Amino acid sequence: MRLFGQRLSVAATIGLVIIVVNILAAVLAPVVAPYGEADIIGDVWDAPETSQTVFGLDNLGRDMFSRLLYGARTTITIALITTLLSFTIGCVFGFAAAVAGGWLDMLLSRIVDALMAIPTLIFALLVLSVLGTSIPVLIGTIAVLDSTRVFRLSRAVAMNIVPLEYVEAARLRGEGLAWVMRREVLPNALPPLIAEFGLRFCFTFLFIAALSFLGLGIQPPFADWGGMVRDNAQAISFGGIAPLIPAAAIAILTIGVNLVVDWILSIHAARRA
Amino acid sequence: MPQDGPEAMEQNIILTIRDLQILARIEGQQDAAKPIVDGVSLELRRGEVLGLIGESGAGKSTIGLAALGYTRPGCVISGGSIVFDGVDLARLPVEEIRKFRGSRVAYIAQSAAASFNPARKLYDQVGEAPVRHGLMSWSEAKARSTELFRELDLPNPDTFGERYPHEVSGGQLQRAMAAMAMSCRPEILVLDEPTTALDVTTQIEVLASLKKLIREHHTAGLYITHDLAVVAQIADRIMVLRHGKMVEEGPAGDILHRPQQEYTRMLVSVRAAETSAPLPPPRHRAAGTPVLALDHVSASYRSLVKVINDVSLTIARGETVAVVGESGSGKSTLARVICGLLPPESGTIAFTGEPLPKALRQRSRDQLRRIQMVYQMPDVALNPRQTIGEILGRPVSFYFGSSGSDVRARVKELLEMVDLPADFAKRRPGELSGGQKQRVSIARAIAAKPELMICDEVTSALDPLVADGILKLLQQIQDEMGLSYLFITHDLGVVRRVSDRVAVMLRGALVAEGPLAKVFSPPYHPYTELLLSSVPEMRLDWLEEVLARRAEIPRVAALSA
């Protein structure tokens, strides 16, 4: 099988199938789901056999399978937007700091140092409790916090590219900061950034789950995978499998994303050689 | 013992390589492999030095490493034998070979700086091999190191080993590496371009020390280099290689003076032209306002280290001025000052009579266009993620506002000017050879229709024949476009060939400046004389002659310190 003119490996195919299934689940949730997101249809933590459902019922007697589908919508959308946003912010400032250097680099790097010095969770708590917990605020907060790490990575990667002579040639030509960043630095900085993207994307669900635990994440009755793990965590004590199902969904998507990322990186490596 | 019988000769042979085949795996293709050494055979006797000469990709380093029973990752010995003292290294397991490496066969690499651990003293590193091989105790190894430092003419041999690698000069470190290789008294020494990274004045010292060391210890040597004149000073026999195959082999004098093969003849004539070609007659210097005029320019890094000291220089229209000097002389910094990357502290730069703003940012787009730069390393001068078409098209659209088909037509024209096929526009730099990449760099510079082109060591990363083509191309472009060149180089052969005027730089200042014929003929400035006399010539006894002459005139030698 081929994609964008490149041969797909077995691992990449598996990864791609996982991602496609997850996206379909998210898009088709209202059509496929047997019950509504918030419908209580039976007893707490009813097993699949007794409740006549695929994965059983959750801590409030709602259908796990339906919530998993609706959860895919919120989780994947928020994680994707957050990661893209954090990479945009991080890369723009990181590249600018590396290319321009001097006072701009100093200023940006110290701001990032200051942000990173504050524990992420406490900072997020502060912002969310002041601004209120809406999804845009949630996305913005996590994106800004995550972008500090992207900033450091992209700045470090760009620092190795900026002294190269093709960048100097562009500067001597009189090119502006934006061109140098976009055309000379970005294409050569992509491989490590793509690898980081795969990781950051998955960390985002976990962070949302942590916020949900504190009641500042996705608000009920909306489902998200991280929140579902936390809500049903106690079922483990009673021998229930309820929390393992959303946890498995997170794990599978994480693996799927990383398999595809590995494949993209291998193409880059082969092109470079 | 001139009457050695055949038996004695046989016993003297320490290394025999027969029909050596080494394959390199090709990335991404599982069964495909290309031969990098193809059926090479050689014999090495005790006390004899065999020079392996060839351009990059000739397989000379691979053969040198094979003598240690080693192949680079991704390479495999697929045929032939490497018999060292009766043992075939090609068939021996790695653990067995390890007993030979370092103790009986030793290696000297091109870059000593990359081969020493910066965190450990020289004694620890030079003495490590004999101790590890169980040949000596630490105190014996230390005594042995001191003895070797003395033989290699290193300063203060008794305490030299107490220093760290960064505390000694490049030439001294290269000699310390020779001491490291000799510490176990090996029977074969593989020398892989040991003087290539050094300045000419340092190269002489290292070459003399290596030669003395090999002769005194009666060590057999494989001397790998691309420079025929260097190898002629040290080798008894020379083997010429190309594309992994032997071209010809013979006594050093025969290869130099009576080469049999066309390829060897080409190598010999290109190299001989560097030192012995008559100086070209001076061309008429265009009158009128010079293209570039530096007036008492001084520059420093962070106001601390003065790197350019009161330099005045003019370049007339259509003229080629060469700035020569050794590493650290400030010649490349001078290029950065002219480009605006390092604004000068004092002095003025005038371009076609008008003052040029000091910093890059203050210069207008048109001022930037008129000065273009070509770099030393074509690998990093071109963005690997852009196609050649994009690389060449950008200056066209940036400076002249062209778009679409105009740009494509101009790119085609530019590729034609540098003798590259038009379909190269679709390729990326990774798919080009070093010489082709350098041609693209030149095309990118002329795309701006400049009046001054700064060429910073443009040929020093290239093989002699390829470099020759690049120099011819530059001259052809100069004739067509009438532009001026500023050549920054350490290679006096290049200076001799291309320049109208020469400026000799030493520690940031110009020590001699004038027409080529004047600067390069007596009476010389003493430093110019030192530089000129340090370039190896294509004569077998050149090294001894120079050393003898230097011993008589210590004044000149003192300048290099």
Image (spheres, rainbow, N blue to C red):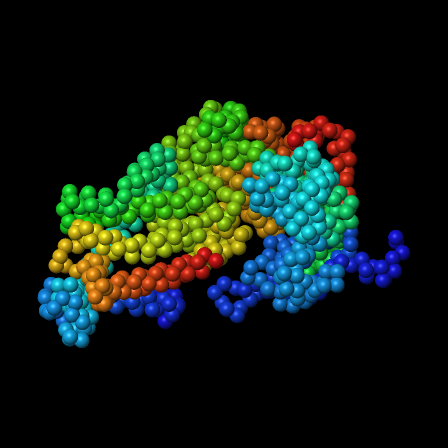
- The residue at 71%/50% (across/down) is B135
Closest to the observer, A23 or B383: A23
Please provide percent x and percent y for residue B99. 67, 57
Please provide percent x and percent y for residue A187. 38, 52
Q: Is residue A67 above or below residue B193?
A: below
Please count the marks in the image: 0
- The residue at 13%/57% (across/down) is A220
Closest to the observer, B244 or A238: A238
B112 left or right of B234 in image: left
- The residue at 30%/42% (across/down) is A116
User: Residue B276: in sight, yes or no?
Assistant: no
Residue furthest to the right: B3
A99 left or right of A43 in image: right
Quarter of the image where one finds residue B547: top right
Please provide percent x and percent y for residue B539. 75, 45
Closest to the observer, B444 or A128: A128
Q: Is residue A8 above or below residue B346?
A: below
- The residue at 61%/27% (across/down) is B511
Quarter of the image where one finds residue A244: bottom left
User: Residue B548: in sight, yes or no?
Assistant: yes
Q: Is residue A263 above or below residue B51?
A: below
The N terminus of chain A - image quarter: bottom left
